[in-house]
């Protein structure tokens, strides 16, 4: 089958399939005489695993680890179980952080409504609260979200 068919079977865009080949998640497929890629059922299954793991927010490195184990004929089941547990813990932590952020935003909004809304300089209004560092998460220069209270 050609890339268009593989894309339909696995619900993954052709551009993404080419990228996965480029970074080694999918092996380079054999080529037909006309230069088109030729995929097999094995490629469909591998791509579905990659796509499923991405939907679960696994990193490309984590997926590569799972695939490398399979390629060496080692069952990746325990590694996958460990990754699932780790990912669930990360999500739980993130949910707690988001709940705290929500409380901080609501608090800011409540306090901010007591300030004037015509302060162009931002020295005596809600802008002042935001700019003076009310406790809460602040994105660093790299865009990372530190934990609440840091």
Image (tube, rainbow, N blue to C red):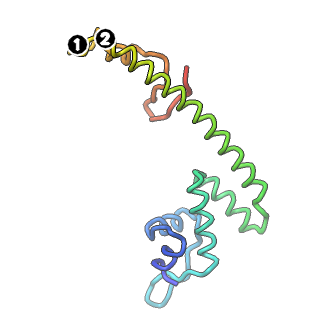
Q: Residue 36 at x, y = what percent?
A: 46, 83
The answer to whether residue 69 is left or right of residue 17 is right
Q: Nearer the viewer, mark 1 or mark 2?
A: 2
Q: Which mark is residue 115?
A: 2
Q: Residue 123 at x, y = what percent?
A: 28, 10
The answer to whether residue 12 is left or right of residue 65 is left
Asked if 111 appears above or below 28 in the picture, the reply is: above
Per the image, label 1 sits on a secondary structure element best described as loop
Neighbours of disc 2 within 10 Å: few (<14), some (14-19), many (20+): some
* Residue that extends furthest to the top in the rendered view of this protein: 124
Q: Which residue is mark 1?
A: 119
Q: Are marks 1 and 2 in contact (CB under 8 Å)?
A: yes
Q: Residue at x 35, y 16 (%)?
A: 112
Q: Residue 21 at x, y = what percent?
A: 53, 68
The answer to whether residue 13 is left or right of residue 56 is left
Neighbours of disc 1 within 10 Å: few (<14), some (14-19), many (20+): few
For residue 107, what is the image quadrant? top left
């Amino acid at each position: 089958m050609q890339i268009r068919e593989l894309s339909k079977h696995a619900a993954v865009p052709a551009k993404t399939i080419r990228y996965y080949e480029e970074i080694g998640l999918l092996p380079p497929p054999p080529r037909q005489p006309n230069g088109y890629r030729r995929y097999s059922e094995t490629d469909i299954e591998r791509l579905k695993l990659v796509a499923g793991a991405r939907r679960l927010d696994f990193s490309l490195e984590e997926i590569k680890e799972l695939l490398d184990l399979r390629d060496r004929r080692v069952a990746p089941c325990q590694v996958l179980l460990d990754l699932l547990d780790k990912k669930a813990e990360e999500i739980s932590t993130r949910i707690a952080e988001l709940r705290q952020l929500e409380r901080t935003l609501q608090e800011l909004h409540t306090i901010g409504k007591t300030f004037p809304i015509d302060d162009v300089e931002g020295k005596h209004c809600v802008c002042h609260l935001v700019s003076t560092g009310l406790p809460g998460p602040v994105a660093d220069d790299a865009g990372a979200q530190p934990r609440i209270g840091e």
